[in-house]
Image: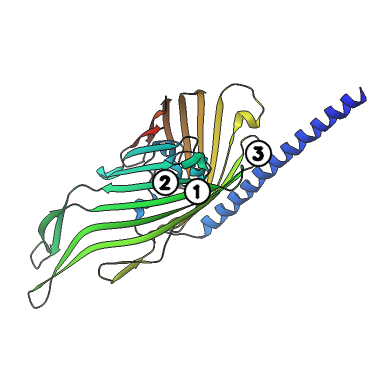
Amino acid sequence: MQLLDQIQARRGSFRMKRTSTIYRVLIIVLLLSISLVSYAQENEKDAQTGFQFMSVTSDARAGAMAEAMTTIEGSPTALFFNPAGIAGLSSQFVASFNINQWIANIQHNSAGMLFSPKDGKYGVFGLSLLSVDYGTLQGTMVWPNALGYVDTEEFSPSAFSLGFAYAKSLSDKFSIGFHLKNASSYLGQSTILKEDSTFATTKNVANALAFDFGTLFKTGIRDVSVGMSIKNFSKEVTFANGEENFQLPLTFTLGLSFDLFRLLEMETGQSLLLALDATHPRSHPEQYKFGLEYHPLQMLALRSGYLMNNDEDDLTFGLGLNYAGVAFDYALTPFGRFDNVQRFSLRISL
């Protein structure tokens, strides 16, 4: 009886230590969030970067969870949030294709592919693609008439990014990854009538090489994961024949996620993932993202999220279906005074 009492006492002590560790992690995240909120209230940052298309999410799962994806691993979604997350790929190959029907009839498209040779022995390799369709616009130029301008030719602005990523699990708990991207933007051409009645034409083209870096740590305590990422690190970009310079939308993010059912020791046979992200962007105030993903069945996911400190969008909704290695995701984001944003994703695993 004494031996049994000692074993039960040790088990109770171990559970208390695990619970204490979880509480410490949550308290740390809470303190970080409070400090970032205070910083955000004191520092206003608006329109300080270019290439903002690199900050728009096309992935439907991410859109449904308010982009709280820093600690979510195992799919091409991680390419656009935390490259360390691709190290958790459970299959040999997976590809995703995403469409984002953005505001003002702008469409963002993206695709990602992951490959894990030798079951991850040599790490996981990834390719990413971003493209933006802005539609067709009417060009104008300054002219000495009553209107002050005349119409020129119609043109189609565009933006594009192609990236290569690599990630490796250094242990069963810790992963590291990077993502190298080449981005470009074309905004048509500018034509100016000079004083000598000749025309000066400038092509509005810019290119940039950007770098993402991330880490992911699985604590081993009831699926609690902690992640960090730095996105769009780059030198200043030269635009319009060297006359204009701007920076990319550099973003630093801390993330935390865990299964609420497991955290509360609820044996339901289901899962309820809670993901929390705190972001520190260069171009606007800090934001806090909360995402939920509920799996009542293995093949069905119901999602929602909330984005704090944003002007137009805050609540997000979505769902996902997964069967035999094929997954379809949908997300809906009410966007205030603009149209609702819809995202669609198709993912195939082999």
Q: Which of the two marks, 2 or 3, is nearer to us in this view? A: 2
How is the protein colored in the picture? Answer: rainbow
Q: Callout 3: 10 Å neighbours few (<14), some, many (20+)?
A: few
Residue designated by label 3 = 220
Q: Quadrant of residue 57?
A: top left
Residue 73 in view, yes or no: no
In-front residue for pair 126/222: 126
Residue at (39% x, 39% y) in the render: 59
**Labels 3 and 1: the sequence-earlier one:** 1
Tell me: residue 326, above or below residue 118: above
Residue 144 in view, yes or no: yes
Q: Which of the two marks, 3 or 1, is nearer to us in this view? A: 1
Q: Callout 1: 10 Å neighbours few (<14), some, many (20+)?
A: many
* SS at mark 1 in the image: strand
**Labels 2 and 3: the sequence-earlier one:** 2
Q: Where is residue 214 in the image (x, y as percent from the top left)?
A: 52, 51
Q: Quadrant of the C terminus?
A: top left
Label pair 2/1, CB-CB below 8 angstroms: yes
Q: Quadrant of the N terminus?
A: top right
Residue designated by label 2 = 126
Residue designated by label 1 = 167
In-front residue for pair 191/129: 129
Marks 3 and 1, how far apart at CA: 20 Å
Badge 1 amino acid:
Ala
In-front residue for pair 235/63: 235
Label pair 3/1, CB-CB below 8 angstroms: no
